[in-house]
Image (cartoon, grey):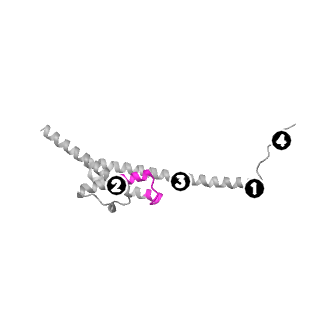
């Protein structure tokens, strides 16, 4: 005698629900995949902006002022692409950090050009908290600038 094959426990209604559930799960997985692709594009762009801004700040500290505008324009273009990907109001922490670093660079360069700190309206597209973080970064940069200037002056005095 052969064992009986398993029989479905679902009714016709249950089978219909299972079929609908499978199509819904398929749609959700496609949405997740699209979000992952968008997040990866955003991450790549924000990493590029942070790298570009760090290069800009290094060039500024080293006195290589000729390339600063090109680095700044490049970072601004990449940030605009990133904002286009996610939309103006949908910022994750990576994009917010990149915007803050970009704004900090703009503040630093403008401070050394004019002696003034740019207003919030002049450094858009940053948000309030990104502008505040950038202002704190500017204060740190100025502190390091002053300390290195004092050290330089002391070495000149000592080794004269």
* Residue 93 forms part of the magenta stretch: yes
Quadrant housing residue 16:
bottom right
- Write down the residue under mark 4: 4
Where is residue 134 drawn, in percent x and y? Answer: 33, 53
Left/right placement of residue 27 relative to residue 123 reads right
Q: Residues within 10 Å of mark 2 (few under 14, many from 20)?
A: some
Pick out the residue farthest to the right.
1
Distance between the alpha carbons at the discs numbered 3 and 1? 33 Å
- Write down the residue under mark 2: 132
Where is residue 77 drawn, in percent x and y? Answer: 39, 58
In front: label 3 or label 1: 1
Where is residue 37 drawn, in percent x and y? Answer: 52, 52
In front: label 1 or label 4: 1
Distance between the alpha carbons at the discs numbered 1 and 2? 58 Å
Nearest the viewer among 66 and 32 is 32
Nearer-N-terminus badge (2/3):
3
The C terminus lies in which quarter of the figure? top left
Distance between the alpha carbons at the discs numbered 2 and 3? 30 Å
Q: Residue at x 24, y 54 (%)?
A: 112
Most common secondary structure along the magenta stretch:
helix
Q: Residue at x 30, y 47 (%)?
A: 58
Q: Residues within 10 Å of mark 1 (few under 14, many from 20)?
A: few
Distance between the alpha carbons at the discs numbered 1 and 4? 24 Å
Task: Report the magenta residues as a range.
Answer: 81-103
Mark identifier at residue 35 = 3
- Write down the residue under mark 1: 13
Distance between the alpha carbons at the discs numbered 2 and 4? 72 Å
Q: Name the secondary structure under disc 4.
A: loop
Q: Name the secondary structure under disc 1.
A: helix
The N terminus lies in which quarter of the figure? top right
Left/right placement of residue 52 relative to residue 85 reads left
Q: Name the secondary structure under disc 3.
A: helix
């Amino acid at each position: 005698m052969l064992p009986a094959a398993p029989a479905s426990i679902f009714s016709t209604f249950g089978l219909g629900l299972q079929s609908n559930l499978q199509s819904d799960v398929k749609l959700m997985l496609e949405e997740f995949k699209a979000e992952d692709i968008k997040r990866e594009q955003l991450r790549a762009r924000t990493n590029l902006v942070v790298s570009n801004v760090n290069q800009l700040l290094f060039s500024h500290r080293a006195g290589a002022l000729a390339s600063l505008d090109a680095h700044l324009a490049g970072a601004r273009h990449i940030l605009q692409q990133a904002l286009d990907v996610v939309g103006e109001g949908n910022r994750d922490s990576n994009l917010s950090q990149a915007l803050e670093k970009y704004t900090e660079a703009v503040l630093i360069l403008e401070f050394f050009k004019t002696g003034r700190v740019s207003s919030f309206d002049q450094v858009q597209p940053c948000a309030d908290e990104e502008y505040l973080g950038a202002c704190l970064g500017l204060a740190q940069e100025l502190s390091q600038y002053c300390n290195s200037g004092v050290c330089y002056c002391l070495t000149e005095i000592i080794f004269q």
